Amino acid sequence: MDRLKILVVDDESRMRKLVRDFLVKGNYDVLEAGDGTEALDIFFQEKDIALVVLDVMMPKMDGWQVCREIRAYSGVPIIMLTARADEKDELQGFQLGVDEYITKPFSPKILVARIEAILRRTNQRANEEVLSCGGIEIDKAAHRVMIDGREVELSYKEFELLTYFVENRGIALSREKILNNVWNYDYFGDARTIDTHVKKLRSKMGEKGDLIKTIWGMGYKLEVSQE
């Protein structure tokens, strides 16, 4: 299988090298850009980039503008990096269609784990038909869920919701992100729909329902201690 290309955009060469070294160890090809203009040139020249790691504060063109330009043409996954822990920035990122938002300083290992999770979800890393973690097994092709060896009957949306949690295990997911990815972007209903579905899903999962943690004021996270 060809190695996936990841574009790392940051005006700090030290930061680019740190991220690149960890990604190369993870068997990715890495392209680098030191400003927003260079990033767009590389992105549209290469055309087969699997994911973009994008710093917010950069010369010539900031990360927000780069994100807007890319989103006008492509749905490629984007992870934003920022030195500011500002809720308004984070909300702006999600409104622009950013997949993840990571505040500096961060652990490169965590960044790689987030990249893996996003690529799993977008099926670029592997076309996994069977997902499993913490005693939960999801057969996507057969649309079947087994929990501790017992088949569990789920509605279509409950199945999609559990699949999304498993594909993004260990990552805090806002209600907005869940709506956008499970109910898709053209859904304009109440975010409380998610809470209702999570409640039903937990009930059907029995003891394993406790793996779905509530993040108060934000959303949910599937937390599995060991796999």
Image (cartoon, helix red, strand yellow):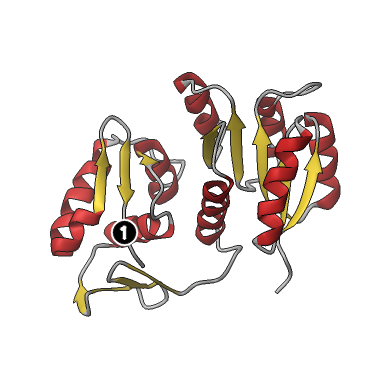
Estimate the x, y position of residue 96 in percent, counting from the top left. 57, 31
Instruction: Say left or right for 181 vs 33.
Output: left
- Foreground residue among 134 and 89: 134
Quadrant position of residue 152: bottom left
* Residue 124 shows in this picture: yes
- Foreground residue among 95 and 9: 9
Q: Secondary structure at mark 1?
A: loop
Q: Which residue is mark 1?
A: 225
Estimate the x, y position of residue 27 in percent, counting from the top left. 69, 64
Q: Residue at x 50, y 33 (%)?
A: 94
Q: Residue at x 60, y 65 (%)?
A: 125
Residue 131 vertical position relative to residue 173 in the rendered view, above or below: below
Instruction: Say left or right for 54 vs 201.
Output: right
Please state which amino acid type lies under the numbered disc 1.
Ser
Instruction: Say left or right for 23 vs 109.
Output: right
- Foreground residue among 119 and 112: 112
Q: Residue at x 58, y 25 (%)?
A: 83
Residue 26 vertical position relative to residue 108 in the rendered view, above or below: below
* Residue 9 shows in this picture: no
The C terminus lies in which quarter of the figure? bottom left
Estimate the x, y position of residue 48 in percent, counting from the top left. 76, 56
The N terminus lies in which quarter of the figure? bottom right
